[in-house]
Amino acid sequence: MQLIDIGVNLSNSQFDDRHATLLADAIAAGVGQWLLTGTSLTESAAVLALAEQLDPPAQRLLCTAGAHPHDAKSWHSTTLSELKTLHQHSRVRAVGECGLDFNRDFSPRPQQEHALHAQLELAAELGKPVFLHERDASERLLGIVREYRDALNGAVVHCFTGDKAALYAYLDLDLHIGITGWICDERRGQNLQGLVKNIPSGRLLLETDAPYLLPRSLRPKPKSNRNEPQYLTWIAQEIARLRGETAPALAAHTTQAAQQLFGFAALPLREATPEH
């Protein structure tokens, strides 16, 4: 059984000097491939460098490159050209993390929207999918993405935690939905627990968003309180239970969906399945 984690913040300082161990632990658990998240020019370059260092054959680690809405305030006249340079690398498979965050508003909303428009145009130009972030901004994000949807080669709403109306609207646009360990939270995750069964196979993707969002139900709980890609197996088991699927069936269709959207190669069975 193989799982693909489509959201790993590998350049986060919580992972310093542990990158090789993280990868080995995840492979042993059956999480054989990751999409590393670029949230700014600096972080996009950093995750690309880590992928090159840890995975020279380019079988396990692919990347995004983009500007998170929190970083939109740093968007300047050369940002787009610098992003285009990063996207020339074959390992960079999606534009983003980009989107809108009206919850924290770390960047002014007009700047968030400007950066989002620019990155959607870039994705359309390059023929790459988009890795989207949204908090308390679903209606506005939908309005903007709808303008570009016919020109986009797919998109995923990463770390979805919204309501039924938002979920159905994203699905109506034929977007993918990324689900994290938020679904394992008995307090905040109840709404999502009731919605996850409504995501069609082929549109559901799995992610940890590591080192964030450690599943609250995880046992034993790590002393570090840090999420890691190896724990995607726990998230997958919970999602499979809520959807009334077996874990292998869930792994099969979510892995296939990630392969199709981001171009992950199928790993040989002996590499995808850990030995016991």
Image (cartoon, rainbow, N blue to C red):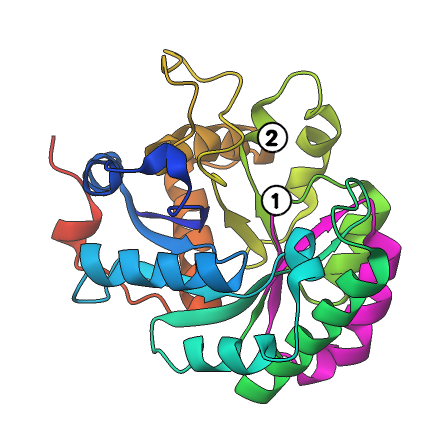
In the image shown, does 47 or 194 lie closer to the viewer? 47
Q: Looking at the rendering, which quadrant does residue 194 occupy?
A: top right
- Residue under the image location 65 percent in, 40 percent down: 197
Q: Which mark is residue 27?
A: none
50 inside magenta stretch: no
Q: Tag 2, which secondary structure?
A: helix
Q: As displayed, is residue 172 above or below residue 119?
A: above
Q: Is residue 21 left or right of residue 88?
A: left
Indicate the amino acid at tag 1. Answer: Cys
- Tell me whether circle 1 and circle 2 mark residues in contact (CB < 8 Å): yes
- Residue under the image location 44 percent in, 68 percent down: 262
- Residue under the image location 23 percent in, 37 percent down: 17
N-term mark: 1 or 2? 1
- Residue 204: in sight, yes or no? yes
In the image shown, does 110 or 140 lie closer to the viewer? 110
Q: Mark 2 packing: few (<14 Cα in 10 Å), some, or many (20+)?
A: many
134 inside magenta stretch: yes
- Report x, y in % for residue 181: 54, 31
- Residue 257: in sight, yes or no? no
Magenta part of the protein: which range? 131-158
Q: Is residue 71 left or right of residue 86?
A: right
Quick one: quadrant of the C terminus? Answer: top left
Q: Is residue 29 left or right of residue 258?
A: left
- Report x, y in % for residue 259: 40, 64
Q: Which mark is residue 159?
A: 1
Indicate the amino acid at tag 2. Answer: Trp
- Residue under the image location 15 percent in, 51 percent down: 271
In the image shown, does 44 or 181 lie closer to the viewer? 44
Q: How many marks?
A: 2
Quick one: quadrant of the N terminus? Answer: top left
